[in-house]
Image (spheres, rainbow, N blue to C red):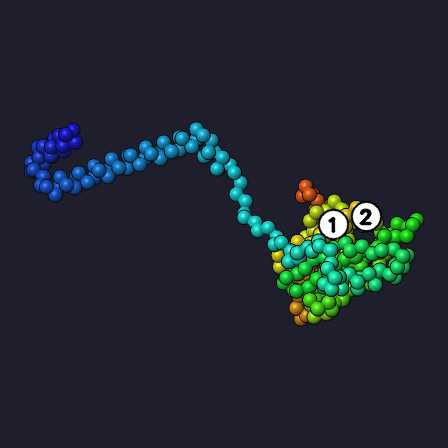
Amino acid sequence: MLDLHQRLQELADAATRDGITPGPAHAIRRGRQRRRRIAAGVASLLVAAVVAGAAGTGELGDRSARPVTPATTPPPAPDLQERPDKPRPGSLQEDAFQQLTSELRRCPGGSTIRADLIGSVWSEKYQRLWMVAAKQPPAGKKRFCWTSGLFDATGNGSRWGARRVASLTAPLTSLGGKANSGPWVIEGRVAKEATRLQLRFRDGRAPMDLAVIDSGDRYPVNFYVGLFSQPDASFQQDGWAADILTAVDAAGRTVTSCRVGPRGDGTPKCPGN
């Protein structure tokens, strides 16, 4: 009723002022304009209420002050599944362990000291078994022996000769190469406090987490391995794609970092054993 009375009064005032009586079209046009003004006013009040409410709760201030961080993708899990089970008679694991045991007979103590199977992992991607074995030093000695090998599903493969640790204080060592008709391999020893080991590459691919094998209480270090692909043409042109190894502890702190690729940013070279 109030709105209708106001419209009638406006029409009367217009008639008095202009000397004519506005028609229906004019009244409709004036009504539409009024509704738009009312709608705009209501929207402004709503915006003001929302801003006031956000300021009262601190939400608006938090949003304006909170830094925007780009989304990051965690490194993919390694394509290596640990096989903790004891090798079954006649299995690929047993065959591989026997081959590594034969290498460890060359260590001090010969066959009088039993070889320990430290661990093995299976790569579904490359259909390969990697295994590491070690042997305790003779009485009065400190430097133990260890060896490792990469085997296909038939038991054929390649293995390192037995080697005694060069230094028990080295927090990270590195060995690497290409298996026969297989992937490239990087492996070595790592300090006990390292729970994660990441490899960065020189060819632009994403970093890769390596598999860390716990050797238990009998040995002062753990072991690690990683498998990756690199075309032969790329190797001939640019060399070894692996670049920097970084070991991290359970709290996320860097234990050590060393270089496996060419000389670069001053990062020290990883010892070979």
Residue pictured at 29% horizontal, 34% vertical = 42
Judging depth in this view, the residue of 60 and 115 nearest the camera is: 115
Circles 1 and 2, Cβ within 8 Å, touching? The answer is: no
Residue type marked 2: Arg
- Residue beneath label 2, please? 218
Task: Tell me residue 64's x, y (percent).
Answer: 48, 37
On residue 214, the disc is 1
Residue pictured at 22% horizontal, 38% vertical = 35
Residue type marked 1: Asp
Q: Is the C terminus in the top left, top right, bottom left or bottom right quadrant? A: bottom right
Judging depth in this view, the residue of 10 and 52 nearest the camera is: 52
Question: Relative to residue 58, is residue 106 depicted above or below?
Answer: below
Task: Tell me residue 169's x, y (percent).
Answer: 83, 48
Residue pictured at 9% horizontal, 39% vertical = 22
Q: Residue 9 vs residue 217: left or right?
A: left
Q: Residue 202 vs residue 176: left or right?
A: left
Residue lying furthest front in this view? 89
